[in-house]
Amino acid sequence: MTSDALIGHQAAYRLLADLFDRGTPSHAYLLAGPRSVGKTTVVRQLLKYLLCLKSKSKEHPGDACQACRQIEAGTHPDVWWLKRAEGKQDITIDQIRQLKGFTNLGSLAGGLRVVVMEAAEDLNPEAANALLKVLEEPLGRTVFFLISHQPSRLLPTVRSRCFVIHFGFTPLDIIKEALVSRYKLPPAQATDLARLASGRPGVALALACSPELGQEMLTQAKGFLSLLGHNPWVAMQQLIASTLKQSDAAHNKEVEKVNDYLKVWLEVLRDIVLLKLDLPGLVRYQALEPDMNKLSSGFSLLKLLDLSQQLEQARRKLEANANIRLTLECLTINFSYL
Ligand SMILES: [Zn+2]
């Protein structure tokens, strides 16, 4: 079994495979849904099914053939992978010009050509308009897969050219089962990781590969608990100071980092709500249950929901490119009023 085997999302994979089987694929697909749920994995699995030189099995696509190895490594000559370059703010028009060179060529193997764009919401306006022109041209046998966890940031005209497939979270049991049967984790550990991953198989696998990641999430969760228990102003200032050390060039990285924090904090609030509702079985950070129980008496459900709303609002602002420092300071002020 390769690392690429799907965890959940079988329906999305089968739908795509059937469309290609019938010979009626769209020119462009938009795979939309939260980060790390498996959107790119579905595309990779589909490409193996379509381009494998040995196996034609839909259920178990991919073989150790050259084409499958190239798909895995991102080097298949008929597949163009595209995402924001390291250190850049967005996907640029130069990248779309290079892409045009690829779509203008015929397939090396005489068949399908595929473009996969990861985090397509990173397209800047100029690049998005250039992409739109590419999508409007007759594309022959070139098919586009745009992958996005923030599809609302895409140009509506680009979105409307795509067949949209929505991805949701994968149920805990499916993630747990995959960790036990494929990756041979003990059931108890698999349950813990599946719970921490909260529906995102990619996160579960990352946690299984590097336990320090789970430790970091726990540390962030603990940090937030102490923030709730003490002076939020001081704690938030410390967060701002420790997170925002980098230069403007690393803006995207900073946003991601702050967003990771806010995500963990939201999860902690959700856990406290669950404890208040007497649903401990669904709690994500079980190791912190005693601390959360202690804190929960000081917060009404209404207040917890208010806090969650503030955090959600801050995340949305950051995704809309708001200034990070200002957003966090606003959040601090709102927190101190609650
Ligand atoms: Zn193969």
Image (cartoon, rainbow, N blue to C red):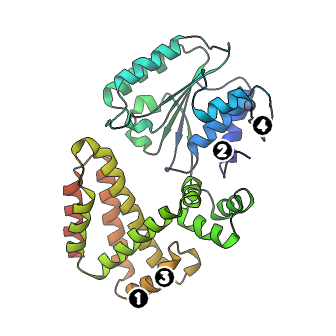
Question: What residue is at 32 percent from the left and 71 percent from the top?
Answer: 307
Q: Residue at x 63, y 61 (%)?
A: 171
The residue pinned by badge 4 equals 58
- Sequence-wise, the earlier of marks 3 and 2 is 2
Disc 3 and disc 2: Cα gap in Å? Answer: 34 Å
Mark 3 and mark 4 residues within 8 Å of each other at the beta carbon: no
Question: Do residues under tags 2 and 1 come within 8 Å of each other at their CB atoms?
Answer: no
Label annotation for residue 4 = 2
Name the spot of residue 7 as percent of width and height, x first.
66, 52
Q: Is mark 4 within 8 Å of ligand 1?
A: no
Q: Amino acid at mark 1?
A: Lys
Q: Given contact means CB atoms under 8 Å apart, are the residues at marks 3 and 2 in contact? A: no
Q: Give the mark nearest the N terminus, 2 or 1.
A: 2
Give the Cα distance between marks 4 and 1: 51 Å
Q: Secondary structure at mark 4?
A: loop
Q: Amino acid at mark 3?
A: Glu
Check the image and report above or below for 2 versus 291.
Answer: above
> In which of the image's four quarters is ligand 1 placed?
top right
* Quarter of the image where one finds residue 111: top right
Q: Are marks 1 and 3 in contact (CB under 8 Å)?
A: no
Residue neighbourhood size for the residue with mark 1, other residues' Cα within 10 Å, grouped as few (<14), some (14–19), many (≥20): few
Residue at point 42%, 44% (across, down): 150
Q: Are marks 4 and 1 in contact (CB under 8 Å)?
A: no
From the image, tell me which residue sits under label 3.
289
In the rendered view, does 42 fall on the left or right side of 296?
right
305 shown above or below 53: below
| Place of residue 1 in the rendered image (x, y in percent of width and height, measured from the top left) | 74, 47
Circle 1 residue: 294
Q: Residue at x 67, y 35 (%)?
A: 46
Residue 42, picture quadrant? top right
